Image: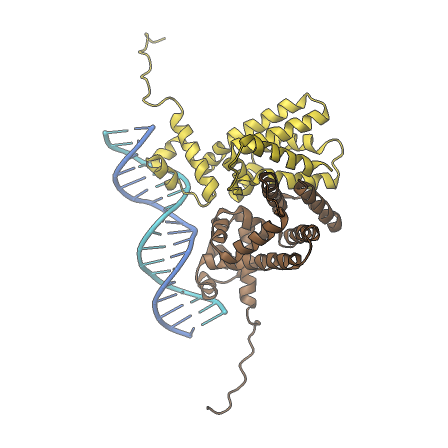
Chain colours: A brown, B yellow, C blue, D cyan
Amino acid sequence: MDAEKPPPARRRTPRGQGRARLIEAAADLFATQGVSGTSLQSIADRLGVTKAAVYHQFASKDDIVIAVAEPVIARLASIADAAASLAPTEARTVAIEGLVDLALAERGTAATMRRDPTMAQLLDAYEPYTRQIARIDALLLGAEPTAERRIALAFAGGGIMALGSLPGLAGDPHEVRAALIAAMTRALAV
Amino acid sequence: MDAEKPPPARRRTPRGQGRARLIEAAADLFATQGVSGTSLQSIADRLGVTKAAVYHQFASKDDIVIAVAEPVIARLASIADAAASLAPTEARTVAIEGLVDLALAERGTAATMRRDPTMAQLLDAYEPYTRQIARIDALLLGAEPTAERRIALAFAGGGIMALGSLPGLAGDPHEVRAALIAAMTRALAV
DNA sequence: GTCTATAGGGCGATAGAC
DNA sequence: GTCTATCGCCCTATAGAC
């Protein structure tokens, strides 16, 4: 082996922070302009770097889109995990509350994942996403997935992700959360 | 005045039909690829003409976007008109049924108007649209627009426009319609 | 109402220096 | 991990013939 090497130079920015900043900027732009409407140049501009620096972190624009969705997918998995061991009624409650909290915490990205055509088509072909969606749908549909229940679920799914278009969502966060849970529970009460 | 003119030559295609076909093609592409993701070239390709022919009918891409939304705006106005002379309770019922029928009839476009960032931003600055939305919101919010009612309305508005993402919407249309009206009524029953 | 042709610029992506 | 420079393509929009 070689003689002792000097300790690796401390990065000026912690490992992965540049990547995290990029994901945050991209998520924000995707939410307001759509994926197709967001150029790599505009992402680079927001970070104060060039396009080439963006390409150093991600091989393609599609990779950035997936990376933006990843934290939401992870939360979907957590929700499904938490509900998996519960009885059907409690599982439904946990799933609804989890989805509302997710929609509120990741409002822009969660909405973009459902609304943006580019993002939606990419995710439909991304198995880690479709798997978690299938688990949550199964929880909310229950043992007897009638047509009426399926329609109510699609309706509620769209509603919960529509918060991006709620400008006056200001107000007591607890009140907002409770009202959303109530609305979703009512919509699903077939 | 001049002497009698010969009758105008019969158009090979009825007046405005080219325009209507273009709007239909654009609406379909906007719904599946988003406005930003749809080029004028792709619209022209679908019609079997060139881009220049498209520019003969519309001065800009924005004009096409507005033209696509126009039929939906007209139906929103009809719904608000029909409900205007009714008592609050009946007005709500008429509004809900009208919105469900609208969402089912113009599924792709109605969804695009709410979901697509480009379309939504254009419409937010288009007074004929915002005026009708305000009328319908007022009908559904009732005399006491509490925060909870506003949240339920936003939720229901997103849900009713989420039908584009319902692949299995096949089935008895009457059943689908009834299930949607029921889900929306429940969501709004604050 | 359609065409060809082109202006003028932005796009995603790559190469290679530092 | 950032830069400059560039490739090749596609974009919206315009000009002008038929």
x, y (%) of residue B77? 59, 26
x, y (%) of residue A169? 69, 46
x, y (%) of residue B7? 33, 12
Looking at the rendering, which quadrant does residue B131 occupy? top right
Q: In which quadrant will I find the C terminus of chain B?
A: top right
x, y (%) of residue A179? 72, 45
Q: In which quadrant will I find the N terminus of chain B?
A: top left
Up the image or down, A113 lies above or below B118; here it is: below
Please name whichever residue, A179 or B124, is drawn nearer the observer in this view of the structure: A179
Please name whichever residue, B50 or A134, is drawn nearer the observer in this view of the structure: A134
Residue B4 visible in image:
yes
Q: Is residue A180 left or right of residue B61?
A: right
Please name whichever residue, B119 or B151, is drawn nearer the observer in this view of the structure: B151
Looking at the rendering, which quadrant does residue B157 occupy? top right
**Residue that appears at 73% across and 50% down:** A173
Up the image or down, A22 lies above or below B65; here it is: below
Residue A170 visible in image:
no
**Residue that appears at 49% across and 59% down:** A64
Q: Is residue B139 left or right of residue A136?
A: right
Up the image or down, D1 lies above or below B150; here it is: below
Q: Is residue B73 left or right of residue B30?
A: right
Up the image or down, B44 lies above or below D9; here it is: above
Q: Is residue A126 left or right of residue A150?
A: left
The count of marks equals 0
